[in-house]
C-alpha cells in the first residue's frame, strides 16, 4: 500500500480534530501538552496541503468552515477506527476514550441523564462528554453528533434505536389551582379547566394527552390559555405556580407529588406512557466510547426508581 501520510501529517490531523471538538486552539494545545502556536502552525500546514480553509478564526473563537466540517467528520471516523483496530489487536485491553457528543431533550437531560454523567466519567475518565440539551431535532451527518435521545422510534433505517424506558405519564395540578377551580372527576370535565398546552417542536402542533378509556388508549384534545414551546419543563413550572392542569412524565413530578406541591388527577385514566430511545448511526466500526456509553445508560436505567 502506498504511504500517503507522514507522522507529522497524521499528528496535524489529530490536532485538527481536537481543536474542532474543543472549539479552541488554546484548549487543544493544553490537552495535547503543546503551545497554542504549535497547534496553529500544525493546522496551517494541513490547510496548505489541502488547499482548503478549515477554520474561520476571530480574536475570540474559531469555528469550522463547511469544508472543515466535512473533513472533520471523515477524519474523526477514521481516527476512531484506528483506535478500535488497536483495541482489537491488543485483545481489548485499551481503555475506552474519546469525545462523545450527545443530544437530549430537556426533561430527560435534567431528570435522568445529566445526573448520571459524573458516575460515567468516574468509570471512564478518558471519555469526555458534550451534552446538547434541546428538544430540537438534530442532523447526525451535518452536526457530528454521536448519539441522541428522543421520544420515538425513527423511521430512518440508518439509525440504531435502543429503547431506554417507557416513561409513565401523569395528570397533575397544584393544590392552589384545584382550590380555585375545583377537581375534575371525569374526562369530560377537563373541558371546563385550564389545560396547559405544549407545542411539539417538530410540527408546531399542540400535543394531545394519551389517556386510558375502557382499557384502550385514546388521545384527548384539551385547551387552555397557556402554551409553551421548545422547553417542555415550562409547562411543569406553570402547573407548580397554579396555572392549570398538565400531563407530564411521572419522573419529573415524583418529588412534587410526594411533597404535596402537585396532586395527581384522574388516576383511573392513567397508565399511559411514551417510549424513550437512544439513537445512534449504524457503523461497521462503531467507536468503543459509543458502545460503552450505550451499555452504561441501559444498565443504569434498568434500575431507575422514582425520585423521593
Image: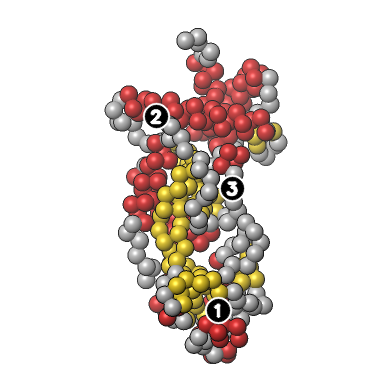
Q: Which mark is residue 232?
A: none
Q: CA distance from mark 1 to mark 2?
A: 51 Å
Q: Position of residue 179 (x, y in %)?
A: 54, 90
Question: Local crowd at mark 1 within 10 Å, few (<14), some, or many (≥20)?
Answer: many
Q: Which residue is mark 2?
A: 84
Taking the image as shown, residue 120 lies to the left or right of residue 32, namely: left
CA gap, disc 3 and disc 2: 26 Å
Say left or right for 278 vs 69. left
What residue is rendered at 46% in x and 77% in y?
A: 213
Assign a secondary structure to mark 2: helix
Q: Residue at x 64, y 17 (%)?
A: 49
For the residues bearing labels 3 and 2, Cβ distance under 8 angstroms: no
Secondary structure category for the residue under label 1: loop
Identify the image quadrant of residue 176.
Answer: bottom right
Q: Earlier in the sequence, mark 1 or mark 3?
A: 3
Whichever of callouts 1 and 2 sits on the residue coming sooner in the sequence is 2
Q: Earlier in the sequence, mark 3 or mark 2?
A: 2
Residue occupying the point 60% across, 53% down: 136
Q: Is residue 285 visible?
A: yes
Relative side of 294 to 237, left or right: left
- Residue 101 shows in the view: no
Kindly identify which numbered label has been placed on residue 138.
3
Looking at the picture, how far across and down is residue 53, in whole percent? Answer: 68, 26
133 or 248, which is in the foreground? 248
Q: Residue at x 47, y 71 (%)?
A: 217
- Residue nearer the viewer, 93 or 166: 166
Res 234 → quadrant: bottom right
Position in image of residue 249 (x %, y %): 47, 68
Residue at the spot of label 1: 245
Q: Position of residue 256 (x, y in %)?
A: 45, 75
Quadrant position of the C terminus in the picture:
bottom left
Amino acid at each position: 500500500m502506498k504511504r500517503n501520510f507522514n507522522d507529522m501529517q497524521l499528528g496535524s490531523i489529530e490536532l485538527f480534530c481536537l481543536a474542532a471538538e474543543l472549539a479552541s486552539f488554546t484548549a487543544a494545545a493544553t490537552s495535547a501538552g503543546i503551545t497554542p502556536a504549535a497547534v496553529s502552525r500544525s493546522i496551517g500546514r494541513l490547510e496548505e496541503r489541502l488547499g482548503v480553509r478549515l477554520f474561520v478564526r476571530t480574536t475570540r473563537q474559531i469555528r469550522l468552515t463547511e469544508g472543515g466540517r466535512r473533513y472533520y467528520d471523515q477524519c474523526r471516523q477514521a481516527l476512531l477506527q484506528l483506535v478500535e483496530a488497536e483495541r482489537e489487536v491488543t485483545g481489548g485491553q485499551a481503555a475506552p476514550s474519546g469525545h462523545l457528543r450527545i443530544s437530549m431533550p430537556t426533561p430527560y437531560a435534567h431528570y435522568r441523564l445529566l445526573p448520571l454523567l459524573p458516575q460515567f466519567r468516574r468509570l471512564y475518565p478518558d471519555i469526555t462528554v458534550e451534552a446538547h440539551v434541546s428538544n430540537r431535532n438534530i442532523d447526525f451527518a451535518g452536526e457530528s453528533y454521536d448519539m441522541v435521545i428522543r421520544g420515538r422510534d425513527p423511521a430512518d433505517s440508518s439509525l440504531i434505536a435502543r429503547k431506554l424506558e417507557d416513561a409513565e405519564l401523569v395528570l397533575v395540578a397544584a393544590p392552589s389551582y384545584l382550590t380555585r377551580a375545583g377537581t375534575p372527576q371525569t374526562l369530560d370535565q377537563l373541558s371546563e379547566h385550564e389545560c396547559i398546552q405544549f407545542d411539539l417542536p417538530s410540527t408546531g402542533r399542540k400535543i394531545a394527552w394519551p389517556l386510558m378509556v375502557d382499557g384502550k388508549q385514546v388521545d384527548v384534545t384539551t385547551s387552555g390559555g397557556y402554551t409553551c414551546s421548545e422547553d417542555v419543563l415550562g409547562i411543569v413550572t406553570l402547573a407548580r405556580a397554579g396555572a392549570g392542569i398538565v400531563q407530564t412524565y411521572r419522573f419529573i413530578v415524583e418529588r412534587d407529588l410526594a411533597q404535596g406541591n402537585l396532586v395527581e388527577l384522574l388516576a383511573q385514566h392513567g397508565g399511559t406512557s411514551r417510549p424513550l430511545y437512544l439513537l445512534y448511526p449504524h457503523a461497521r466500526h462503531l467507536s468503543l466510547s459509543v458502545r460503552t456509553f450505550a451499555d452504561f445508560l441501559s444498565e443504569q436505567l434498568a434500575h431507575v426508581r422514582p425520585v423521593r
